[in-house]
Amino acid sequence: MRANTLRTLKAAGRPIVNAWASIGAPYAVESIAHQGFDAVTIDAQHGMMGFDVALAMLQAVSTTSAIPMVRPSGLIPGEIMRWLDAGSYGIICPMISTADDARALVRACRYPPHGQRSFGPARGLLYGGADYLHGADREILVLAMIETREGLENVEAIVGTDGIDGIYVGPNDLALALGHLPANESVDPTMRSAIERIRAVTVAHGKIAGIFCSDGQAAAERVAQGFDLVTPGNDAALLRATMARQVEVVRSVSVE
Amino acid sequence: MRANTLRTLKAAGRPIVNAWASIGAPYAVESIAHQGFDAVTIDAQHGMMGFDVALAMLQAVSTTSAIPMVRPSGLIPGEIMRWLDAGSYGIICPMISTADDARALVRACRYPPHGQRSFGPARGLLYGGADYLHGADREILVLAMIETREGLENVEAIVGTDGIDGIYVGPNDLALALGHLPANESVDPTMRSAIERIRAVTVAHGKIAGIFCSDGQAAAERVAQGFDLVTPGNDAALLRATMARQVEVVRSVSVE
Amino acid sequence: MRANTLRTLKAAGRPIVNAWASIGAPYAVESIAHQGFDAVTIDAQHGMMGFDVALAMLQAVSTTSAIPMVRPSGLIPGEIMRWLDAGSYGIICPMISTADDARALVRACRYPPHGQRSFGPARGLLYGGADYLHGADREILVLAMIETREGLENVEAIVGTDGIDGIYVGPNDLALALGHLPANESVDPTMRSAIERIRAVTVAHGKIAGIFCSDGQAAAERVAQGFDLVTPGNDAALLRATMARQVEVVRSVSVE
Amino acid sequence: MRANTLRTLKAAGRPIVNAWASIGAPYAVESIAHQGFDAVTIDAQHGMMGFDVALAMLQAVSTTSAIPMVRPSGLIPGEIMRWLDAGSYGIICPMISTADDARALVRACRYPPHGQRSFGPARGLLYGGADYLHGADREILVLAMIETREGLENVEAIVGTDGIDGIYVGPNDLALALGHLPANESVDPTMRSAIERIRAVTVAHGKIAGIFCSDGQAAAERVAQGFDLVTPGNDAALLRATMARQVEVVRSVSVE
Amino acid sequence: MRANTLRTLKAAGRPIVNAWASIGAPYAVESIAHQGFDAVTIDAQHGMMGFDVALAMLQAVSTTSAIPMVRPSGLIPGEIMRWLDAGSYGIICPMISTADDARALVRACRYPPHGQRSFGPARGLLYGGADYLHGADREILVLAMIETREGLENVEAIVGTDGIDGIYVGPNDLALALGHLPANESVDPTMRSAIERIRAVTVAHGKIAGIFCSDGQAAAERVAQGFDLVTPGNDAALLRATMARQVEVVRSVSVE
Amino acid sequence: MRANTLRTLKAAGRPIVNAWASIGAPYAVESIAHQGFDAVTIDAQHGMMGFDVALAMLQAVSTTSAIPMVRPSGLIPGEIMRWLDAGSYGIICPMISTADDARALVRACRYPPHGQRSFGPARGLLYGGADYLHGADREILVLAMIETREGLENVEAIVGTDGIDGIYVGPNDLALALGHLPANESVDPTMRSAIERIRAVTVAHGKIAGIFCSDGQAAAERVAQGFDLVTPGNDAALLRATMARQVEVVRSVSVE
């Protein structure tokens, strides 16, 4: 079965740079996947695409060596199963708040006897290889998002759950949950210590500590802080920013 | 009928900033249309979308005040008619090389007696208004791309054709046609004088001089040169660039 | 943030006329949205479209001043979140039977601290505006469908739930639940008094009383009865009826 | 091979009632096809759908006994071939102005030796049957639209062309071509005599005389005039009209 | 209402041959539906299509006499309702493990008073007929998949549940659940007796005993064993196999 | 730029095995591309997909080492350009009948100065690489279909045209053109000698001789005959055949 290079990177202590795809377009995500990312995550929670478009996006990512992952809309086993069958090599599941949630997530992602995923790997077989059944539980990454107050309190139990490969911090939702405004790189001490605590616990368990960041600069700082997997911004936000910048440049100069 | 604000901007001597959409995604183009552009052109020549996606993209642009335009795949009357019926308020037609081409383009875009467009405005009616029939020939822009050696030679005749509202320079194809490598802002003297000649002739006729540019800075320089309508880059190229930049920043810092 | 004009209409005591879109086609719904409706609801419960088509439909409605709303397939927080992120400015949630259901619905629609909606407004940001986070909970309408026997019994508690902006009666399902055949304008006394009771309780709470109707005439009668928001028929049913009528007219005359 | 019932109706002297589908939605067109039409024509000229949606629409029509036809965007052999391969049982080709056009249309629709259609019937085989090759030229209808001044002058030659099964009048474009405003049921004497002449010549040749009409009443009058095939309105226009009517009824009553 | 011919076949003691569609393409499934199957099941659990494509697939199947069924992604009432509204005439629900599950499944598929399906049959009305409300509960098949250890233990209770029309064995998941490798036609005695037990109990209740098989030969053996409904393979697997075989033949001969 | 392995295979004298994709489904074509083919051709002439689906299919093929090619609907430069921009690495153009046709085909596929392809490689850049401009004319294959009487007569001139990389025989259309029934492997002496003549002339010019075949056995015989590139059947036909075979096996055994 195709090896999940993200595990190799973690083992080697090298940072994993992950793209975030919310634009529903196979051409956009293929363009992104060619820019040197180690992984590309299709956001089926807040992203603007349904299954048919997301399937083509997973295929588009698979034309490159970037590992395709999906964030499902929630801890919904039937939906998670479909993303895995569609060839996702990792699941970043939102709103994991308890060890029970974490165990349910693992069950949704793993075949018996380690879980309850139903067999029928479809496109997963094409992407992973003919021995998919035997390698899927070993290769596919299961990352739990910690972004609620309860999740923060239970971070030890969540990270310690067998089959959880790592944590992915959603700083915006976590900020909202803790009574702050959404902010990826909050300088609020509570937020900073919360995020650092999640990171430290995760790394102590030898698992992947991941986080969403505003852009490359912020992501670099998270790597410096000790995060293993960083997402340097959302595709739609970056597209908006670069487009707005071009308009601004034209107009500012033309005005003179 | 809804007024075409691009005509107003030209009349007022204010630059028209046009976005270029090659990514086949209504969400992407709606995101772009919100960044302050005066117009958004959907590229049905080199862009990665078919009619069904392009239709939704035209609708997405129409949620804003940006004027939706389309570049068809060529001087194909049946195709141009479909883009107009779908609500495009401007046509930027590639590869117009002769006055005959220019007249054929006008015929494709105008109703009798000024042309041969078939009646059945469909979504055009929703976007333009109930009096579409009476206003369409007045509001919809017809821009001819000059990007061949023959087109350059015939620039006077093309620009002078009744019903042609302006010219749009395709610097890449023009460079190729003149024996150079594609370059939006070529410093080659032949290229520079060719582009300036097209601009000067067009402006002398009181028509819109438009051009594709690499980015906002280049577009600003074209405005300074006297161009009326500038496109500060292609969406996919700008997306690739900003994504590559984020990866570069993460990796450069992480390496240290 | 863009104001939700439906709130203004309610405050002014003016009826809200809402279209019902079950045909999965951006062009159809844009055509409908141009006919003078105050709102257009995309039916993701019984309507024939998935997310990708519904997204383009929301964009199509947004080309007009009609407020876009969605009926989700059920009280499924992850799905409701996706419709809000896609730019829906109202949720009409089916099968709300208890105060617990009503509270869960509010939690799904509101950000912390009023709810548990996850942050990532995507297209909502484009439609609502840059200050979406601060205005979303204020502008977006949350309507609970009362259409079960239990819901009818709990109407006071449901309507009284904080964050519920109003009620939308599903007369067909309510009739089925009460042992009758589906009928939008049932003359059965039980049905009539049930519907009147829901309306009266809702209006007494100062909230929006809405209802599905067979057509314009029936809707006018509901307005006269005191309903605030009426839906004068389903698009597919109205299309079928007008088409059948044309055939009937041709054939009846031709036979003579 | 499946018989084309439109030929049977013509032979029996019974009117053919044809629906016109411009909304790109398989569900809409299937709803329409169930209302008693003899045929349903998908409008690939002014209609709002590309190939992928039109294919599903042809399948949707094929769930009923209504005969599926397509109006291509023009006299483009490669496009006409694709509609036939997709299972269209009739072609209504716009803008046929000369006998040469008519012969080119026949060549596009017929296999050698009667034409130059390329072999590869794809879905046509599923709809028509295993003996498609032997029956296609016999069953599939070829209708030429007369809607230009030149077409009107050449009506005898066009109708008399071998392989042309009938004429379909496009009253709007014909009116424009003759210097009038578009009108399906013009009372202008020139228009009336032009349309009657086309009808009379066609019927004299024993071929199908078809025409687009505003609605059922107008279509009934065309049948009374001697037309064989009538289209009682366009789906989007009828949908808009019925929707506008519902709004009008609600608002007129509510105002009282 | 259109009769469900699968009930007739069961009553007549004739085998039901069911196709399995996992390829998301209306043309592929229409091609399959023409090959003599009694039913075609669209696999919305492991199959590669979302709602929009599946809707067109249901329409494509409905061009033939094969009965369209759907396997939902799980026991999710809101999703099952959508497949029924889209015109599915049978539900094959995965992972039914208890009598409670079976009752919940029946409730999701039946209208009150037999269940809690919400009324709004949409395309179901077109496929089933105008009296859909009165016939739906009688015609639509409800099949429970038994594929877990718990399901096997509860087979009597599940089969005995009112409203359950039959059982469909998922041999792969059942094998995994019982500690074996996935195998459709396992020769393991435990597997053989488990499957035979499910079949025998089901038939004893006069209900439909169905099962997935690798291919036609295996399906024939299941019929001989006494199964009522057999699926002779998955479309994607059969396509892969025939494609691989053609390559192998070319290469083996060419090498010589 | 990515090397076109089909050129390498030709140079090495090894047969090229090409799949033929007419089913509009990215999952189907990705499944096929994994079965050992050297190339996969998407049939945009007789195949059942529009641009949006075909784009995703090209991406799906690009997840494997099989070379993606497209058959356009005809010798239409604007369309051919779009398939190349979408990442097709070869064009198999139908109905090339004269040296003029062949030259027009080359012009459509090559950049200036060798042709008139417009610059804007879009997805081609992602698939081919950053030096696409410099390698495209070298790597992309241009194959002319000879399938008319005129094409047969002009085979020397067509094959001898600079820039034509080979010939692809369409045996069905050629048979029709010569007055026979369509047959891939006709035993008619005229057909056999016509096909052998095309092959011999092509090979004599050192160019690729390709042909469509019914299946793997027929393709093997064509390889033995000296063809370089063979297509062992059409995906939809092979799917229908294997599906029909499974039904036949179940029914034949069950009857006993």
Image (cartoon, coloured by chain):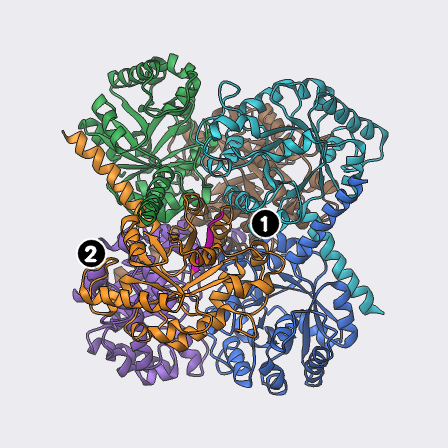
Chain colours: A brown, B purple, C green, D orange, E cyan, F blue
Q: Can marks 2 and 1 be said to lie on one chain?
A: no
Of C33 and B118, the residue lying toward us? B118
Residue B23 appears anywhere in the view:
no
Left or right position of F65 against A21: right
Q: Which residues are magenta?
A: D65-70
Measured from the top left, where is residue A105 in percent x and y? 60, 31
Q: Looking at the image, is D135 positioned above or below residue D53?
A: below
Does residue C174 show up magenta in the picture?
A: no
Residue corresponding to mark 1: E30
Front label number (2 vs 1): 1
Q: Amino acid at mark 2?
A: Asp
Q: For residue D50, what is the image quadrant?
A: bottom left
Do labels 2 and 1 touch, CB within 8 Å? no
Q: CA distance from mark 2 to mark 1?
A: 44 Å
Q: Is residue D68 magenta?
A: yes
Dot 1: few (<14), some (14–19), or many (≥20) neighbours within 10 Å? many
Q: Position of residue B234 (x, y in %)?
A: 40, 62
Residue at screen point 49% across, 73% down: D107
> From where the camera sits, is residue E91 visible?
yes
Task: Give the numbered dot on residue B131.
Answer: 2
Q: Which amino acid type is marked by label 1? A: Glu
In what quadrant of the picture does the C terminus of chain A appear? bottom left
Q: Chain of mark 2?
A: B
| Closest to the observer, B197 or E104 | E104
Location of residue D203 in the rendering, given as x and y in whole percent from the top left corner:
36, 65
State the residue in front, F149 or D110: D110
